[in-house]
Amino acid sequence: MSDETSATLSNFITDIIDEHLENGRFDHVHTRFPPEPNGYLHIGHAKSICLNFGTAQQYGGLTNLRFDDTNPTKEEVEYVESIKADVKWLGFDWDDRLYFASDYFGVLYEYAIQLIKQGNAFVCDLSAEELRQYRGTLTEPGKNSPYRDRSVEENLDLFKRMKAGEFADGSRTLRAKIDMSSPNLNMRDPVMYRILHEEHHRTGDEWCIYPMYDYAHCVSDSQEHITHSICTLEFEDHRPLYDWYLDQLGIFHSQQIEFARLNLTYTVMSKRKLLQLVKEGTVSGWDDPRMPTLSGMRRRGYTPEAIRTFAETIGVSKANSVVDVELLEHVLRDDLNNRARRVMAVVEPLKVIIDNYPENGEEFFDVAYFPYDRENSPTRPVPFSKEIYIERSDFMEEPVKKFYRLAPGQEVRLMNAYYITCTGVVKDADGEVVELHCTYDPESKGGMSPDGRKVRGTMHWVSARHALDAELRLYDYLLTKADPYDIPEGGDFTDNINPDSLQVLTGAKLEPSLKDAKVLEPFQFMRQGFFCADYDSKEGALVFNRTISLVDTWAKMQK
Ligand code: ATP
Ligand code: MG
């Protein structure tokens, strides 16, 4: 792990850990990241990964990767593999500590038997609907199940027969015997096991009873001797149950600690909704560059360093809040600024013919990839010739005030090349500008002023003869509203989908050095944004994604 993220952080979680180390409850730190393999990881999970691995690292401790695969109907092997790849990509390693909750099905079963024998659990024949009715509400206590006082022998017999497959799905459950009048609904004799005749992606048809999350999670933590079980706020009300199971069983007692989940403006973050976007074809897949998934962000051009820095910047808190997505983008720009080579690419080209340049002339300028550090920067040869492309938006036939770029009679600097002056405008039948004529000053080689005269505009350009054609994919937010929960009455989140979140530009012209760009390698297309080659990019059919524009709205807001 790199040094910059192992800096010592202090927050309410480290305060709790410090206390435990001081009072002797634990003498080390061992955390886990427990994804359910029912979707791809998103930026919210990244926060949890950074928190779990980062906190353990800070104390010289360890972190396990554990798949919470207790729900056989929704889980797939594809997800397991993508999650492993994403955690590694983020820069974290579980070494040989890869676990599955399903590894503990046997143990969980034995512990359930123990709880039955202790009089802490019973087999209940109420249907799902009856369970709901008996449960009570926040203001009314629940009612005891008529099956609550079954004998230990009967419970043992029925539970074994549940496991043996004698009963239909939903006909019986195993429940903890706690307190139907508890003000905490989670403590009202919660279900521990349900009957489900379903294949499991790892255990096949070995089991037809499956443990519920609350029971499986605390026992899994205990099995792995997790000291601090960090989870999101919605589990706060489940902590008494977490503690109850471990206390009744008398086994290693992990400490659950809750923190506020990450929410981002303009971003949907629930796996269910992300799956819906994939299934309905709103996006091209889990790794569509507009998705807040780690695989989508990776394809977009995010670096793991930027995501880790973001996680560190936002910190952890006990109160739910929404983080401005522009902060994430600010951190990304900051990171790319230090690693992206500066190159020239014309996004929407307009041809310029330099009339006084030799007909078949060609020259190469040696240009630094990192102009802010010319001394140490590698360089590449950039060709110049009689016909070049400039950005269409860099020309105005009738320039508005303070437009210092190209206009009839106006002189500008072509970055690293020459001064040129616009002498003619060619239009098509519709009056659309199709070509410009210019003259250049041979004395201004390298873009240097020949005589001290100044030009106010400096523009990027690409030699027409040497240019590479490319498709550019420009992205905007998937949602039109900053608040992802601001949903019209009777509608759902898809009503806020931005129809213009993807813009494909097919005619871009790139400088020839980009022929060797590696997929996902970051570049700054000068004045245009940060870009990287997409997985779809091939020689002769280059495709680049715009990772992010250059305008830092976050930095502006802070001023
Ligand atoms: P989702 O609501 O997106 O389906 P989940 O909580 O069901 O997410 P899990 O696979 O169970 O997804 O999550 C694995 C871990 O990541 C959990 O510890 C969970 O608390 C954490 N996590 C999930 N979403 C976020 C988030 N937005 N911010 C921080 N942590 C999160
Ligand atoms: Mg979950």
Image (cartoon, rainbow, N blue to C red):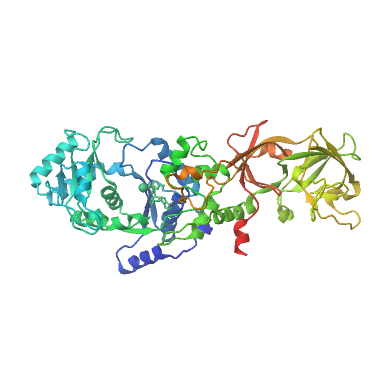
Between 299 and 551, which is closer to the camera in this rendering? 551
Q: Is residue 128 placed above or below 23 in the rendered structure? A: above
Number of callouts in the render?
0
Q: What residue do we see at 9% from left, 49% from top?
A: 149
Residue 16 appears anywhere in the view: yes
Give percent across and percent down for residue 506.
67, 35
Residue 252 appears anywhere in the view: no
Q: Residue furthest top?
A: 540
Give percent across and percent down for residue 93.
44, 48
347 sits to left or right of 225? right
271 sits to left or right of 123? right
Q: Residue furthest front?
A: 489
Q: What residue do we see at 75% from left, 36% from top?
A: 467
Between 278 and 212, which is closer to the camera in this rendering? 278
Residue 514, picture quadrant:
top right
Q: Is residue 141 placed above or below 79 in the rendered structure? A: below
Give percent across and percent down for residue 490.
42, 45
Give percent across and percent down for residue 549.
64, 49
Quadrant of the snapshot with the C terminus: bottom right
Residue 321, picture quadrant:
bottom left
265 sits to left or right of 390? left
